[in-house]
Amino acid sequence: MSPPLASRIALVTGASRGIGYATARALAKAGAHIVAVARTQGGLEELDDEIRQDGGSTTLVPLNLSDFDGIARLGAALHERHGKLDILVGNAGVAGPSSPLGHIDLKPWTDVIAVNVTANFQLIRCMEPLLRKSDAGRAVFITSAASNKAQAYLGPYAASKAALETLVRVWANETASTRIRVNLFSPGPVRTRMRATVFPGEDPLTLETPEQVAQFIVPMCMPAWGETGKLYDYKTRTLQSFRAPA
Ligand code: NAP
């Protein structure tokens, strides 16, 4: 029997490590061809090695997602090569500065907004025509509980994830009558480099692994997944129409 995502094309951003890496690997195990985007060539090559060992295939795309024209070029290349996109996982993100708002310069603010919000907006713009060509286009964006906790000292990150969530819900409403399904995934604390940078005193062994979390992202990428405009909260294992109060 062929695997459930055989002949499906999955674009995963932030695939060089952490949650994106584990999700790309899990999607590949389910049979998808992975288009892996990140800046770090070494991480992408490691992913490629592991996926090949599992019998899968990848296209590596070393790209800074702040290069918005680069995202548009990627869309054009995918159109030329595959004529469609089946799965988009908007996972790449940066934590930005851990400081009071008044101490944050404009540049770190715009850097966080560029990667966490504008790059996803550009992905939506450039990938929607390709997802429409799929018989079951699926998009999942990785958000954070910081979005509605208004967490002190993580202002740019919290604001960027709140903006992302609204953007994604708008897109879900706009595509509700199509075959595309658009959802959010909130992983809670996960053992990654980002988490260790923001919370250096935390024991990483107390946290969920990216591999554990990825197992819950994969079903949202399957053709059988019918929900749209929802947020899956990994911590509570619930699918929510709107964010529950923090
Ligand atoms: P991570 O280990 O730091 O991985 C982040 C990924 O994003 C890397 O692959 C990184 O690749 C990529 N990335 C960052 N900036 C980029 C850029 N300018 N261009 C291209 N790729 C870029 O972090 P993670 O914890 O796995 O985070 C993944 C997602 O989960 C993020 O959206 C994060 O906000 C969210 N999240 C994480 C946690 C947690 O506890 N870990 C909790 C809630 C939400 P390169 O550096 O190679 O470019």
Image: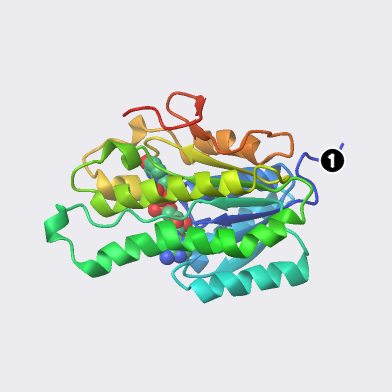
Residue 170 percent coordinates (x, y): 52, 47
Residue 51 percent coordinates (x, y): 66, 52
Residue at 68%, 34% in the rendered image:
225
- Here the colouring is rainbow
In the image, 244 versus 220, the foreground residue is 244
Residue at 57%, 50% in the rendered image:
89
Ligand 1 near label 1 (Cβ, under 8 Å)? no
Q: Residue furthest right?
A: 1
Q: Is residue 20 above or below residue 202?
A: below
Q: Is residue 4 above or below residue 8?
A: above
Task: Give the left or right position of residue 198, taking residue 244 as reference.
Answer: left
Residue 115 position by quadrant: bottom left
Pointer 1 residue: 2
Which amino acid does the dot numbered 1 rest on?
A: Ser
* Observer able to see residue 52: yes
Residue 155 percent coordinates (x, y): 24, 50
Q: Is residue 200 above or below residue 65?
A: above
Task: Give the left or right position of residue 164, taking residue 156 as reference.
Answer: right
Task: Give the left or right position of residue 244, taking residue 179 as reference.
Answer: left
Q: Is residue 188 above or below residue 166?
A: above
Callout count: 1
Residue at 12%, 60% in the rendered image:
103
Q: Quadrant of the N terminus?
A: top right
Residue 183 percent coordinates (x, y): 56, 41
- Crowding around mark 1 (Cα neighbors within 10 Å: few <14, some 14 to 19, many 20+) is few
